[in-house]
Each structure stands twice: as C-alpha cells, then as structure tokens.
Image (tube, rainbow, N blue to C red):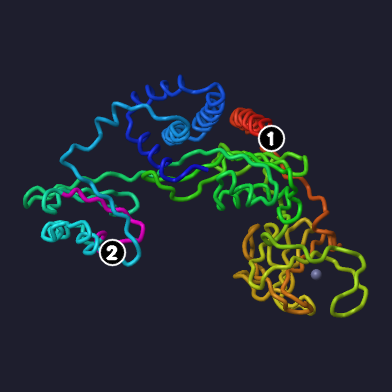
C-alpha cells in the first residue's frame, strides 16, 4: 500500500502537532488538493469521523489515521511546530534498532559512547533490567556529546512506558512518557481476480484482518469453494499502533462482500446490555446456529449422495455426509453450540464425536486422529476444537467425514436450510438503525467510487 517509512513519519508528525497547527495545515492541504483527491479524502474523513462518533475513544486515533493518509497524498507544507520541535544543534540523537545477538556493550562501543557514562545509567534504579535484556527490534536512542560523553539515553521499559535518562554531572534525571496504544480506522476495498488472499494483499490488508473477514462472512459464504473472480469486498477495520509502529490487527467495524452477485453486509454492534456481535442490514446476527464448514480452508473431497461406490468396501453405498480433505492434525470445530453425546471409537468412523445441538439437530465428525478436550456429556460452544483430522476407521487418506442429522434423518450439510437467527429485539432496532445507517451510506459511497473508477 504505502512504503513503511513515509507512513511512519507522517504519523509522528500528526502526533507531535497540537490541535491548532494541525487544523491549519489540514486547511492548507485542502486548498492544494485536486477535486479528485478532495473527494476521496472527504469520503475517508466522513467515514472515519462517523465511526469515531460511534466508537467511543477512537476520535484521537481517527485524526491520526486521517492525517497519515492525507499527508502522504501531497507534499507537506512546513509547519511551525516542526521547526519548534526540531532538536537544537547541541543534541545529537542517534537511534539504534537492536538486532539478534546484539548487546548494550556492542552498541555503545559502536557509537563511541563513554563506558563510564553507561555505567552511571546502568546504576540508575530500574534501568539495568530493560537495558541488559534487549529484545530484538527494540529501539534505543542516545544523545551523544563531545568525546563520546553520553548526555541522555532513551529506551522502552515495557509495552507502555518510554524512559529518558539525562546525565547531568553525577545526577541522573528521569523522564517517563506513556507509550499509548492507538486504534486507527482503515478502509480497504478490492475485487477478487485470483484468490481472496491475493486481492486482500493487493488492497493492503493483513492476513489477520482477512481471516477475520472470512470469519465474519463465513456463515453465509463458503470461502473454500464459492469464491469467484469478480467477487468484491469493502472493509472498514481497526489497527492497533504504538509510537508509529504497527502492533496488531484490530476488529472489523463494518464490511460488505459481494459473492457471485449477491451482497452480504456486516456491522459491528454492541447491544444496550453490552453484547458485541456482527449484524446484517436487517439487524439479524451474521453468526448462525451452525458453521458452514466445521473445518477451516479445507477441500471437499466427497459430497453427500444417496449412492456411490465405497472406496474401501467396493460396494455401492450411500455417502451420508461430506468429506473434507485436510492434513492430519488440522483442528475440527463444533459446528454449533451443543453437548457431546458421544466421543470414542465408532466402527468404520474410527475416532468419532457426535454433538447434540437440541431441537433434533445432531452432527457427527469421523476419522479423527485425536480428540479435543471435551468428553461425553460436556457442553461445547460453536467453534471450539473437538478433535483433529486423521484417517482412523475406514479411511484411505486423512479427512473429516461430517454428517448432519435433523430428527435422526441424514441431511446434506451443504444444502440443508437452517432457521434464520432472530433479529435484534424491536426495542434495540432504533438504536441499531441510527448507528448502522450512516455506515451503510459511507460503505456504498466507497464502493461506488472504487468500482466505478475501474
Ligand atoms: Zn465420508
């Protein structure tokens, strides 16, 4: 998407700026924008502000995210605050990123830091531990004066504290600043030509966000076999950053996915009583009673049929489930909430688990190499690992044999129609609609913009 370095610089600037100069520079930028850029930035700004209004505590991070995007688009005008914060000619900060096997001694001798000064620092309470147990990738900054005199050192004590120690004769002055985590809201949009992962990578999405996207829509879209060239998605998501560096992927805020011409939408929403979930346009949970596939990213090797030739028995027999080929040891997940009705050896099924989901629904998982931690009689929640793919019983290669029964009758798990989950209660809908409608409008605008410009 963007090169790492300018992005980090832009962020640092936006963090350093106080409110007023920031607003002033933004105004200056607007004037320099072409109409085209202004429209895109306007869209981004609108959606980010809208999300900020919805998600408490995001306002500050949203400003930074907007700034990072806006500032990259054009040459930056010089700002007052930049000049003011520029180090004086006396300060000579050198920043070092710790590499594997590097010690503080090596770093200091490389920089020519006076060793006696380094000992003063190490004697300071709380400094020895973080400075002698350096983590790869950690940043240290040294302010070095004449003849290697150490004037100050900066390091991170832990995930949340940055320490500066300034040497003044035999005195050491400590300044602690908080390394605050920032949640930034980002927008990505892509059309699939080869694979979901290729499209996601091209749109600058990290794998974790892409997997989250597949999880959110995984109840409606079969990502193993229903993705087609021309499918597309738009996603508003969070990333957690600190000191201008990416820490981890956050949640998806809102997204749409068009699969084979049919559009699905999902919005993150917290109910009045504090339950977080994803809901579609009508306020129905996207999470269904049953997972589409009880295994992630596996290939269907045999479908449900009333008559087929059994590969081992050689006889024509019905195949009353679906086979998913996967490597031995791949986790198998409970398709729905339920109770373990059986976990043990079951003839040709080998190691098998049967779950009872109530209301007459049961599922069976066969040929497992090993069981999960659940035993007969225990309750499981949807998605928990109940076992691992294997080839026990009558199986020629590792795969999961999955059966779905309604009132004791085998049904095709890929085709059985399941009851739609109940939408949010009427009392919740006004609040839901008020939050989701502006998100919907903005998603539509981004999509119109992105996919009309092809
Ligand atoms: Zn089978």
Query: Magenta includes 287?
Result: no
The residue identified by callout 1 is 281
Question: Within the image, what quadrant is residue 260 found in?
Answer: top right
How many marks are shown on the rendered structure?
Answer: 2
The quadrant where ligand 1 appears is bottom right
Helix, strand or loop under label 1:
loop
Q: Nearer the viewer, residue 439 or 42?
A: 42
Q: Nearer the viewer, residue 284 or 389?
A: 389
The percent coordinates of residue 208 (x first, y second) are 55, 52
Q: Nearer the viewer, residue 210 or 125?
A: 210
Question: Within the image, what quadrant is residue 123 found in?
Answer: bottom left
The percent coordinates of residue 365 (x first, y second) are 73, 68
The percent coordinates of residue 185 (x first, y second) are 50, 38
The residue identified by callout 2 is 133
Indicate left or right for 222 with 271 as reference. Answer: right
- Tell me the distance, in whole angstroms, between the alpha carbons under discs 2 and 1: 51 Å
Does residue 439 appear anywhere in the picture?
Answer: yes
- Whether 441 is drawn above or below 307: the answer is above
Find the magenta span and give its range.
Answer: 130-144
Indicate left or right for 398 with 148 as reference. Answer: right
CA neighbours of label 2 inside 10 A, class few (<14), some (14 to 19), many (20+): few
Does residue 270 appear anywhere in the picture?
Answer: no
The percent coordinates of residue 398 (x first, y second) are 72, 74
Q: Are marks 2 and 1 in contact (CB under 8 Å)?
A: no
């Amino acid at each position: 998407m963007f090169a790492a370095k300018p992005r980090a610089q832009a962020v640092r600037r936006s963090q350093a700026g106080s409110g007023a100069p920031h607003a002033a520079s933004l105004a200056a930028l607007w004037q320099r924008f072409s109409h085209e850029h202004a429209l895109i930035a306007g869209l981004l700004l609108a959606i980010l502000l809208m999300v900020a209004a919805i998600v408490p505590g995001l306002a500050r991070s949203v400003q930074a995210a907007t700034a990072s995007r806006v500032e990259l688009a054009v040459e930056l005008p010089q700002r007052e605050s930049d000049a003011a914060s520029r180090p004086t000619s006396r300060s000579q900060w050198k920043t070092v990123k710790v590499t594997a096997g590097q010690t503080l001694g090596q770093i200091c001798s490389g920089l020519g830091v006076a060793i006696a000064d380094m000992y003063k620092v190490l004697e300071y309470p709380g400094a020895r531990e973080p400075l002698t147990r350096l983590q790869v990738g950690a940043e240290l900054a040294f302010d070095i004066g004449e003849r290697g005199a150490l004037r100050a050192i900066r390091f991170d004590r832990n995930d949340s504290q940055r320490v500066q120690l300034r040497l003044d004769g035999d005195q050491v002055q400590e300044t602690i600043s908080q390394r605050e985590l920032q949640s930034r809201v980002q927008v990505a949009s892509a059309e699939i030509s080869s694979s979901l992962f290729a499209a996601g990578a091209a749109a600058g999405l990290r794998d974790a966000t892409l997997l989250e996207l597949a999880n959110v829509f995984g109840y409606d879209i079969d990502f193993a076999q229903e993705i087609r060239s021309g499918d597309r998605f738009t996603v508003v998501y969070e990333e957690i950053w600190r000191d201008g560096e990416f820490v981890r992927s956050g949640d998806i805020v809102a997204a749409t996915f068009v699969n084979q011409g049919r559009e699905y939408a999902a919005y993150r929403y917290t109910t009045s009583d504090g339950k977080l979930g994803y809901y579609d346009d009508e306020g129905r949970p996207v999470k269904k009673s049953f997972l589409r596939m009880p295994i992630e990213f596996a290939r269907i090797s045999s479908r449900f049929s009333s008559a087929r030739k059994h590969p081992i028995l050689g006889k024509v027999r019905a195949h009353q489930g679906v086979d998913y080929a996967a490597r031995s040891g791949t986790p198998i997940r409970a398709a729905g909430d339920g109770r373990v009705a059986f976990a043990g050896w079951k003839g040709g099924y080998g190691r098998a688990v049967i779950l009872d989901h109530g209301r007459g629904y049961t599922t069976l998982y066969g040929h497992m190499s090993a069981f999960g931690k659940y035993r007969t009689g225990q309750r499981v929640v949807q998605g928990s690992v109940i076992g691992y793919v294997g080839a026990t019983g009558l199986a020629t290669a590792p795969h999961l044999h999955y059966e779905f029964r309604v009132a004791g009758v085998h049904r095709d798990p890929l085709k059985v129609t399941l009851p739609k989950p109940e939408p949010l209660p009427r009392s919740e809908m006004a609040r839901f609609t008020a939050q989701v409608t502006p998100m919907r409008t903005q998603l539509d605008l981004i999509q119109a913009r992105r996919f009309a410009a092809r």
